[in-house]
Image (cartoon, rainbow, N blue to C red):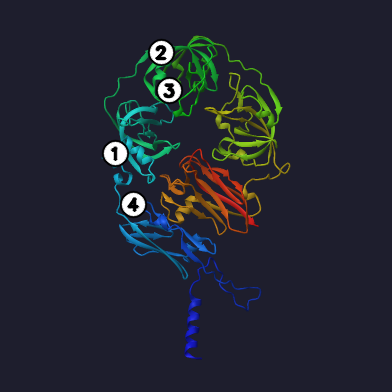
Amino acid sequence: MKKGTKLVALLLGLALMVPACTPGANPSKSSQDPGTSSEAPVNYKVTISNKEELQAEWFVGDPSRKVNLEVEPKANITQLVNEGKITITSSDPAKLAVEGQMASPVAAGEATITVKCGESEDTVKVTLQAKQTVKEKYGVNHEGTAEDPFDNEDACKVAKHEKYNNEDFYVKGKVSAFYYAPGSRTDGNVAFYLTPAEGKTEKFEVFGCYKDKEKKQPLTDDDIWVGGEVTAHGQFTVYNGTQAETTAAIFVKCEGTKPQPRQTLTKTFAEVLAVGNALQDSDSTWDYYKFQGYVTVKEGNNFYLTATKGEALVPGKSDAAHQERDIKGTNAIELYNAGKVEALAAKLLEGAKVEVTMIVKNYHGTIENGLDLKDEDVTVLEAGTKWAVPEPTVANKTVTEFIALENNKKNAYTVKATIKAFKSGDTKDKYGNMTITDGTSDVAIYGSTATATALAWDGAGEYAFTNPQDFLTNETTSALKVGDEITMKLIRADYIKGETTTIQGTGIITAVTPSGGEGGEGGGGSGGDQEGTKVTLNIAEYATANSVTSGTKVSSIALDSVVTAKAEGTDSNTGKIYIGNTGTTEWRFYKSGTGTLKIELAAGYVLVSAKGGVSTSNYGDPTDTEFTIADNKASYTNTSSNFNIKTLEVVYKAA
């Protein structure tokens, strides 16, 4: 053999020894092994797909960033990285540390990220800046420490800042008003607003405040008061897209002159009503007020008093800042939750004249008791009569006939229909929310139950749930599927907001016939019950496996080589993975910019079902939610509030 021929043979032999960039390729079997065939390695081309994001302003101390990759042909990138077939390295680990697909800034300077797969290579050069102070990072006047706490304006600014990353900060300010005053809740939760600086209007809310969070040791009137200079600390959030507040807070101290002990002031009904209307929203009086009135209306556990016997309630609306909530009676004082005390319920009969001693609160325009009432807080001056329970009208209706009725809780109707969909967001598992149809018309059902005694007369001639906890639960909804035929006892309970009325019903399920006949599995149910390949994703496990730190933005996650979950939306926070103090991990989507989760499949496959564990409160318990499927893609969007994904389950099959 010639010398050059030997060199070529040697090089070919060495080339065959180089590991191929291929996922799980089986070693070639001997040609003498009958019935087997060798599998050729795949040569992938790898590129970094988020270079602009990696090159954006990046400070030491900022969250880690994921190096997003694309490969051709398509494959499971996470698997290739985990198996070491794709390598991601830093030119200077002392400045930029890389572990898996996560890059973390360590020190100021420059570093180059290099991604290799076989002979394919891609790079991106990044610049790391020195660690920012809290003042620099958020553009505020204080550091948020115990020695230099935020003021009201700093706290509002940081809570809404795009760089805020679940940090625990101290905040100090004068108590403007209580949302939950000491002693007003059985769980001890105290919540209050801070007073804004002169010329400012936005108030920061210290929510869920305790002396000791773990023991839930509550605050008392001796600890905190309106006008006191209070210091507390906790993590921040933005409730309902507008209210900057703490998720939960620990009380440090309250300084200043304590108010005098509470007095009991005897006033007329009209004077107490005027005191309540003069309060800021959610504020309560310090002193107790004693007054007389007549029990006029009962609604569930709530009773409404008026100045004269039998006086009709004058309905109204709260201001626009509170979404114009319905006020049942602008001329009434509500005894909120008084019916939960059996001895009180026995006193508060129709037409009874009573003397009440209570803290006065203005809740979105309704004047009510600021603390839970006790038996001794109400004295009967003139006995009333037992609340009448009129006979209801019950008749069979179609969905079309039901939605043509007036909004009237005095009548219940038997409606036979088919489950068309379960509502996302609030979810079927918590409230039994669904859409039912008769084939011609649809109606939304908000709150349904399989407990026959849950829907009963409330004593004022209307149907109401005697216990909201009787709504459908995970166990009772697990057998319900889209396509099932159900019979419901429904009342019209429309949702009215401002000038907009949404027709909806609420009621009990009395019979279910599964789709496909008696005992059938039903259509559109869990993907695990259908033919196909099921893949799952647990966000907490994903974050651990990929060393994801809280606040890291992840635009897409491959569940396998076929299924990809994508986060889309213009809000810069959509797609970030957050980890709470308790270890709860979630993939967050913001209503600002309409955050959307999309499930996409590789060519040649058909999507059977897609669902996920969704929560609409940060670090809240997830609820099983079916996603909308269209054009062989699944999506979930909730524009009314932020939502968080904890788990995903997708079922697909070959086309």
State the residue in front, 280 or 229. Answer: 280
Figure check: 392 above or below 581: above
- Looking at the image, tell me whether mark 1 or mark 2 is earlier in sequence order: 1
The reply to whether residue 208 is visible in this rendering is no
Kind of element beneath mark 1: loop
Q: Which residue is mark 2?
A: 271
Give me the disc on residue 61: 4
Q: Is residue 400 left or right of residue 142?
A: right
- Looking at the image, tell me whether mark 3 or mark 2 is earlier in sequence order: 2
Amino acid type indicated by mark 1: Pro
The reply to whether residue 288 is visible in this rendering is yes
Figure check: 8 above or below 139: below
Amino acid type indicated by mark 4: Gly
* Image quadrant containing the C terminus: bottom right
Label 4 – label 1 distance at C-alpha? 20 Å
Residue 252: image location, x then y, percent: 31, 35
Q: Is residue 51 left or right of residue 605?
A: left
Label 3 – label 2 distance at C-alpha? 14 Å
- Looking at the image, tell me whether mark 4 or mark 1 is earlier in sequence order: 4
Kind of element beneath mark 3: strand
Label 1 – label 2 distance at C-alpha? 41 Å
Q: Which residue is mark 1?
A: 149
Identify which residue is drawn at 63% across, 24% down.
Answer: 406
Kind of element beneath mark 2: helix
Label 2 – label 4 distance at C-alpha? 57 Å
Figure check: 36 above or below 160: below
Residue 346: image location, x then y, percent: 53, 16
Asked whether disc 4 touches disc 1, contact meaning CB atoms under 8 Å apart, the reply is: no
Amino acid type indicated by mark 2: Glu
- Looking at the image, tell me whether mark 2 or mark 4 is earlier in sequence order: 4
Residue 490: image location, x then y, percent: 64, 29
Residue 270: image location, x then y, percent: 43, 12
